[in-house]
Amino acid sequence: AQSVTQLGSHVSVSEGALVLLRCNYSSSVPPYLFWYVQYPNQGLQLLLKYTSAATLVKGINGFEAEFKKSETSFHLTKPSAHMSDAAEYFCAVSDGHSSASKIIFGSGTRLSIRP
Amino acid sequence: DAGVIQSPRHEVTEMGQEVTLRCKPISGHNSLFWYRQTMMRGLELLIYFNNNVPIDDSGMPEDRFSAKMPNASFSTLKIQPSEPRDSAVYFCASSLMTSGGEQFFGPGTRLTVL
């Protein structure tokens, strides 16, 4: 069975500071991993995805994530936070291999940016 | 591409009434997912379809909930009768299996049951 754990339901950083959102996964098969972002009153948007190619994945809005198999982690980072980054972030895992794959979402991390 | 389309965007109804939420997936996508999001429970997968066939409805909370996908371009989620605890944002998402499972979400329907 697959699962995702996001450490920290709420993270607050200063504008211009490093953003680090943590995600650990569990999967019995090589996983596909995702980070989604949800802005207030909107649906989820894909930030980036890992599908067994390069372990460092670059996404939109300056975010990136590194797949570390030995640590079963897929942490999301951004070097310099911007006020517009305030949102809820979801880590997710899928096996992506079956004919009807579903995604297992984490519980989400709310990112706040201090001026 | 228009993306995933959901209607209505907002629905306010009274307890006991029937509610029907609609979704049009992205053209060509072969999987469709219905989610519910609340502050208390977060994002919950209710049911998903592959090639118009329901694959897993274990997330449907009660028999009051039903979902259909009569064709590749349309799906409905029905609640009958509705209850105040059904108040939530309901999302529809679609995906193409060959894309590695990436799902594209609609804007959601905010349901309020009084």
Image: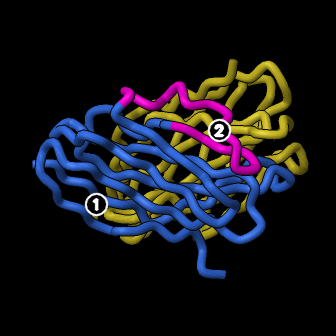
Chain colours: A yellow, B blue
The answer to whether residue A87 is seen in the rendering is yes
Q: Position of residue A86 (x, y in %)?
A: 37, 61
Which percent across, then down, holds residue B27? 71, 71
The type of residue carrying mark 1 is Arg
Q: Is residue A35 magenta?
A: no
Drawn side of residue B49 relative to residue B113, left or right: right
The residue indicated by pointer 1 is A114
- Classify residue A91 by image quadrant: top right
Give the vertical position of A23 relative to B20 (above or below): above
Judging from the image, mark 2 belongs to the subunit labelled: B
Depicted B95 relative to depicted B36: above or below:
below
Q: Is residue B102 left or right of residue B17?
A: right
Q: Chain of mark 1?
A: A
- Mark 2 sits on what residue? B54
The residue sitting at 34% across, 33% down in the picture is B64
- Taking the image as shown, residue A25 lies to the left or right of residue A14, namely right
Front-lying residue, B46 or B53: B53
Up-down relation of residue B69 to residue A103 (above or below) = below
Q: Nearer the viewer, mark 2 or mark 1?
A: 2
Q: CA distance from mark 2 to mark 1?
A: 45 Å
Highlighted magenta segment, given as a residue range: B47-63
Question: Residue, x 29% and y 53% (percent of image)?
Answer: B19
Task: Give the x, y percent position of residue A22.
Answer: 54, 37
- Seen from the viewer's position, the closer of residues A14 and A100 is A100
